[in-house]
Amino acid sequence: MEKLDKSNHSQCTGIIRPVQDALDVLNGKWKLPIIVALLHGYKRFSEISRQVPGITDRMLSKELRDLELNHLVKRSVYDTFPVTVEYTMTEYGGTLKDVIGALHVWGENHRRKIFGDDLLREPVNKDHLG
């Protein structure tokens, strides 16, 4: 059996930890679709709910709070009648645009490879993303 190189092990751990941290923040079925919706501009709660099919209001509320706690989403309350609440990505949250773009490209190319999707004749690139 090959001897474990300690420098290799620490380098691997140094890569795994931040990736795991990112996955912990973005985990679950709903966070990425919510982020995608908000990357296209500010939205009211009901707009996000319509754009993320299948999510319950309770789950949307929970996920928005989690995203707020991680400084990815900003909640703005306006003193109108009735009160208006809008959600938008923070500047920090906007740094996920390239990550989402890379996931989109990989997902489209993966679908093409696995399902032989004829609609995607060429590999997808992220240049066409919003």
Image (cartoon, rainbow, N blue to C red):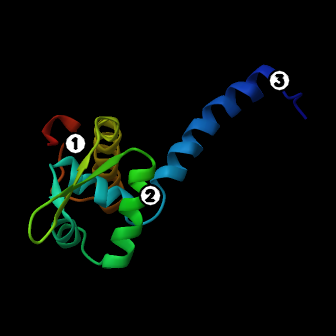
Q: Looking at numbered disc 2 in the image, what kind of residue is underneath it?
A: Asp
Residue, disc 3: 6
**Residue lying at 37% horizontally and 65% vertically, measured from the top left:** 30
Quadrant showing the N terminus: top right
Depth check, mark 3 against mark 2: the one in front is 2
- Relative image position of residue 2 (x, y in whole percent): 87, 30
Q: Is residue 43 left or right of residue 91?
A: left
Along the polypeptide, which appears first: circle 3 or circle 1?
A: 3
- Relative image position of residue 52 (x, y in whole percent): 25, 68
Rendered image: mark on residue 90: none
- Relative image position of residue 88 (x, y in whole percent): 23, 50
Q: Secondary structure at mark 3?
A: helix
Q: Is residue 55 above or below residue 4?
A: below
Residue, disc 2: 66
Calculate the distance from the C-alpha at mark 2 to the C-alpha at mark 1: 31 Å
Q: How many marks?
A: 3
Calculate the distance from the C-alpha at mark 3 to the C-alpha at mark 1: 39 Å
**Residue lying at 17% horizontally and 34% vertically, measured from the top left:** 127
Q: Looking at numbered disc 1 in the image, what kind of residue is underneath it?
A: Val
